[in-house]
Every structure is written in structure tokens, then in C-alpha cells.
Image: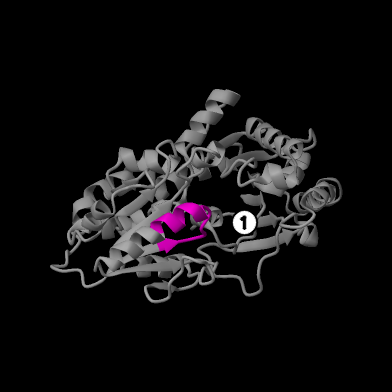
């Protein structure tokens, strides 16, 4: 069969969303074609699948980032989006896919909706929602009415789809309740067979931790919470606890006010397997979300991929956020580490938790249970591929 992925990002993009898509395509036997709103980088990474063709229609300098955001947003909607829709239509005519896997994210929502909701579109359509568009201050930068329209169009695509899924259990519940449609599954990054094999082996505990290494994988989206945590670690270091905070990702934070090169280190953006190997040398993984409930559409429905990455690495997690956030609910359902929902969390308690030499052994059973029940990659992949082929002759 021929599968066309239509979304915001190219196949080699960094971040959790693209990583999920790459993992779900691992070993796919049909033809894979790709259309996106951003160009792939030269010398794209090697994947566990082959992209037979890749097309894109970047918005370039029209992308509303910092300056003239309302004007650029208007131009993006009224000039770029129709042209991008033509590019997508051209790609569909050329590829003639059996199924389109649409991931309507941010500005890609506009051309995807224009093409895929048309009466002329007769192919099998699978839609995955990874984030709602009305988050991260988009309404303030792009215009409240415009973002509301994007959210409406995203929901219409979800309803029109032949099959669908979403990034978290709370998001699935929200969509079912509001739109009266059923999602196929929670689709997120998962653990492979070799990851389960690793977790099932008993984790060797050290008699003494000479250095407690805390990992952070990905982009920092909640600067305030990260600053709080960095200050907590700094105070613990002043009390004599040997700590290091290690960063992996596409962004550098060395210029941030809280960054201290004496006990923090950056290791760049690594391929998934190499990242996993390096994370397994650490002792804990840190996952921050907002401690406030000012942006519930993101906090309650999006789910950080790093949570699953830490599971696969066998790392107990330090989850920070409001009690109603998706990650805190998952961390409460499965005892996989420490939970911080109060900025005044006692420093001494955190220190006692972090210096537990048997932490990996202590949380291993719940890490494995959570991974088995919620994040089995092979099971998710099979369900997804069944959706792709549901109308195949």
C-alpha cells in the first residue's frame, strides 16, 4: 500500500512528536511518502523505514514568531495556506496514496483541512492529534479568532477521519466527550521488545552514589518551573549532595540565568538509540510541566514524550506540575518516582529521595507495569497499521 504522511514537520525533525511518528513507521512494508510545512535538513538521519518521496511547502519568513506576529499570521492564513494546500493537492495527485495519515499541528491545520475535508478527497484518512493549537500563547501572538478557527478546523478533521487517535488518555476522553467520536487508541512513543528485555533484568544498585546524575531530554517549555527545580538542586549541592544535571536536545541553555557549567552539561541532540544508551547511565529523569493551571488545554491534554523515554531507560522520574496535568496523573497512577506539585516542596525530602541508592530497583516494577499497560510500541503500531489498511482491498 501507499501511505502519505501530511503534517507540519519533516521526517527528520527533532522533538517528541516526530519521534513518535518515526517509531510507529518502523518496519512498515508499504510505500511511505511525506508532505510537510517545513523542509527536511540536508543529510537527513537514517530511519528504520524508507521515505520514497518527500515534498514540503515552507512558510519561510512569514512564520509568525516574535515580530509583527498578527500581520504575519494574517499573511500566513490568506497567502501561504492556500498555496500550501495546492502543494498538498499536487502531492496527493502524484502519489495516489491508499491512506493519508494526517497530523494537523499548528499552521499545517489550514492546508490539511482545505484539502482533506473536500468532497473530492475519497481516500482512507487517519488523523492523529498531538497538540491543540490554542496553547503556548498562540492566541496572543496569532490572534484569538484565528486560533479558535484553527481549533475548529482541527476538530472537523478529527470527526471526518475514517480512524483517529490522540496523544494522551485525557485528550482522548476530552475528544470523545466534546465531539462524540471514538479514538482508536492513545498514540505515543512506546517501548520496543529490547526495552522491555532491559527493564525485566534486575537493575544493579550501587552501594554508594558518588555523583547523582539527573537527565533532562528535550526542549524546556516551562522556564519558571525549571528555574525552581534548578534552585532546589543548587541548594542541595550547597548542603553537600553531589549532583549533576545533564541535558540532551536540540537547544542550548548555557546562556540561561540558572545554568551553571560547574554542575550542568549539554550533550546535544542524539539519535534515539544513542540517547537511550546515555540516559541509562543516569540516575533520574526530570519532567516539568506548569505548576499553575493557567493553560489547561496544554497541561491536561498534551503528554511529554520524555516520560516514556525515561521509562525505556529504566530511570525513575521526578515529575513536577499541577496535580491535574496529564503527566502528574500518569505518575500518580503508577509509582515511577517522585512527584512535585508544590513549589515549596521540602528541599530535605527531595534530597533524601535523590540519594536513594536503590531507586532504580525500587521503582522498576511500576516502571515496567506502566510501560506494559500504556506504552507498548508493537501493540500501538499494529493498531495504527490496521487503521491504515481498513479500506484496503
Residue interval drawn in magenta: 216-229
Q: What residue lies at 32% left-to-right and 39% top-to-bottom?
A: 332
Q: Is residue 221 magenta?
A: yes
Nearer to us in this view, 348 or 222: 348
Based on the displayed image, in which of its 4 quarters is residue 330 positioned? top left
| Scheme of image coloration | one colour
Q: What residue lies at 65% left-to-right and 33% top-to-bottom?
A: 155
Please give left or right for residue 37 compared with residue 384 in the image: right
Q: Position of residue 256 (x, y in %)?
A: 52, 67
Nearer to us in this view, 62 or 376: 62
Q: Position of residue 195 (x, y in %)?
A: 33, 58
Residue 36 in the image: above or below residue 391: below
User: Residue farthest to the left?
Assistant: 207
Q: Which residue is mark 1?
A: 31
Under circle 1, the secondary element is strand
Please give left or right for residue 89 compared with residue 276 in the image: right
Q: Position of residue 364 (x, y in %)?
A: 23, 52
Residue 30 appears anywhere in the view: yes
Please give left or right for residue 115 compared with residue 7 in the image: right
Residue 176 in the image: above or below residue 265: above
Amino acid at each position: 500500500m501507499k501511505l502519505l504522511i501530511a503534517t507540519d514537520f519533516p521526517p527528520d525533525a527533532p522533538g517528541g512528536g516526530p519521534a513518535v511518528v518515526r517509531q510507529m513507521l518502523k518496519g512498515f512494508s508499504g510505500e511511505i511518502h511525506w508532505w510537510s510545512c517545513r523542509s527536511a535538513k540536508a543529510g537527513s538521519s537514517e530511519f528504520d523505514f524508507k521515505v520514497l518521496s518527500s515534498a514540503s511547502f515552507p512558510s519561510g519568513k512569514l512564520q509568525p514568531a516574535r515580530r509583527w506576529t498578527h500581520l504575519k499570521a494574517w499573511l500566513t492564513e490568506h497567502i501561504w495556506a492556500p498555496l500550501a494546500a495546492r502543494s498538498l493537492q499536487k502531492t496527493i495527485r502524484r502519489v495516489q496514496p491508499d491512506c493519508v495519515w494526517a497530523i494537523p499541528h499548528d499552521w499545517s491545520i489550514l492546508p490539511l483541512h482545505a484539502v482533506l475535508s473536500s468532497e473530492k478527497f475519497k481516500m482512507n484518512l487517519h488523523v492523529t492529534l498531538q497538540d491543540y493549537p490554542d496553547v503556548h500563547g498562540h492566541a496572543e501572538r496569532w490572534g484569538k479568532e484565528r486560533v479558535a478557527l484553527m481549533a475548529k478546523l482541527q476538530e472537523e478533521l478529527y470527526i471526518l477521519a475514517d480512524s483517529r487517535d490522540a496523544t494522551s488518555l485525557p485528550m482522548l476522553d476530552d475528544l470523545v466527550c466534546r465531539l462524540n467520536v471514538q479514538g482508536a487508541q492513545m498514540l505515543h512513543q512506546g517501548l520496543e521488545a529490547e526495552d522491555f528485555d532491559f527493564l525485566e533484568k534486575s537493575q544493579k544498585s550501587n552501594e554508594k552514589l558518588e555523583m547523582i546524575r539527573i537527565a533532562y531530554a528535550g526542549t524546556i517549555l516551562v522556564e519558571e518551573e525549571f528555574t525552581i527545580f534548578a534552585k532546589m538542586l543548587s541548594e542541595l549541592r550547597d548542603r553537600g549532595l553531589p549532583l549533576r544535571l545533564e541535558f540532551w536536545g536540540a537547544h542550548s541553555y548555557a546562556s540561561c540565568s540558572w545554568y551553571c557549567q560547574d554542575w550542568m552539561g549539554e550533550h546535544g541532540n542524539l539519535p534515539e538509540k544513542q540517547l537511550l544508551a546515555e540516559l541509562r547511565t543516569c540516575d533520574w529523569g526530570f519532567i516539568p510541566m506548569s505548576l499553575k493551571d493557567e493553560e489547561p488545554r496544554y497541561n491536561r491534554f498534551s503528554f511529554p514524550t520524555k516520560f516514556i523515554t525515561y521509562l525505556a531507560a529504566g530511570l525513575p522520574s521526578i515529575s513536577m506540575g499541577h496535580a491535574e496535568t496529564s503527566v502528574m496523573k500518569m505518575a500518580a497512577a503508577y509509582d515511577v518516582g517522585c512527584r512535585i506539585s508544590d513549589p515549596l516542596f521540602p528541599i530535605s525530602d527531595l534530597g533524601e529521595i535523590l540519594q536513594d541508592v536503590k531507586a532504580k530497583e525500587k521503582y522498576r516494577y511500576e516502571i515496567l507495569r506502566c510501560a506494559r499497560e500504556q506504552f507498548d510500541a508493537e501493540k500501538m503500531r499494529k493498531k495504527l497499521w490496521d487503521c491504515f489498511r481498513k479500506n484496503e482491498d
